[in-house]
Amino acid sequence: MNTVRRVSYVFLCIVPFLNFVVVGLRAFRVPGVYQVVGVMYFAALALAAWALGARAIRADAQDRRLLGLAGTLLVTSFALVALLWVGLGPPWQATAAENQMRYLVLIVMATAIAGGFVVLREALSEAGERFYSTLGFAAIMLSGPLYLIWNTFAFGVFFAKEHTGQVPPAIISLGDTLDVLLFVAGFLTYLATVAFAASLGRVQWLGRRATRAFIIVNGVALLFLVIRGLHYPDPRALSTPWYTSPGFVVGIPAVPFIMPFLFGVVLLRRAGEEQSQEGPNQATAFS
């Protein structure tokens, strides 16, 4: 791997953690500042993805095109965060208009993640792995629509707040039901990620240690989610800061997409490898 691709790989791997800083610091939300930072951050992410392997979408080989497309779709989710969420902060700090944009982005993210996993399942099927990829496919096909429904209602809440100053009673009455939708969507997304990690490990597109790491991290997230329960707590009612509550953090709508994003980075790396045509069981990532 040449220097440019190596730097691109490392940069993309730390993007989810950079996002916590870039998105979380409300001080960035200054007109003229957050737009410039967002465009620069997005450009850096897009260039890194292209240099690493997104250009494989144009390759002649079908397997490389599938890997490039799957990786690009999975990486797209956080590319939108980099562009539009600079200084956004949590929902209770953002304005109603900003929160509408937040949930529109989450709708696109959920769609991109689902699409990326669908393409990845096709690539894994061609590589001969169908058992775990089918389980993951089933889980993501259920979680994707649930995320779309939940985010659409969340968008409606802030749309109503901006235009009428209050949330319609009909939406308030659905609070418990929407909490269950978000719980199930997050649970299934973590489950799909575990299944696809096992599938990637079977075809050796992930090293053994990386496969274990993905499975363990997502398994722990699932455990915290289950311990928290179906109800999504109000962060302002917590006895400790929200970021110290694992059950709250793993249930944040964008958090289950972090591991799929990292899958995307791995797939782009593989798609860009010069030796990718040697077969699906040769080159590995995260060894």
Image (spheres, grey):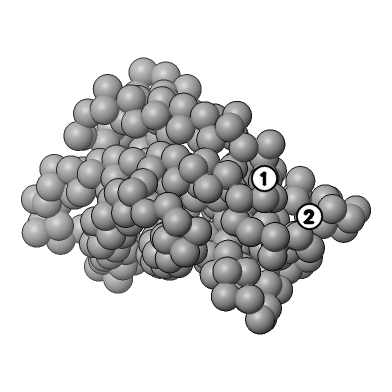
| Residue 8's disc number | 2
Q: Position of residue 18 (x, y in %)?
A: 67, 44
Q: Position of residue 182 (x, y in %)?
A: 26, 47
Mark 2, Cα crowd under 10 Å, few <14 / some 14-19 / many 20+, is: many
- Identify the residue at image location x=41%, y=25%: 220
Q: Marks 1 and 2: which is nearer the front?
A: 1
Callout 2: SS: helix
Q: Is residue 247 above or below residue 158?
A: above
- Identify the residue at image location x=70%, y=60%: 278
- Identify the residue at image location x=70%, y=73%: 55
The residue to which callout 1 is attached is 285
Label 1 to label 2: alpha-carbon separation? 14 Å
- Identify the residue at image location x=44%, y=40%: 198
Q: Is residue 67 left or right of residue 260?
A: right
Q: Is residue 64 left or right of residue 6?
A: left
Identify the image quadrant of residue 30. Answer: bottom right
Residue 140 in view, yes or no: no
Q: Is residue 284 left or right of residue 105?
A: right
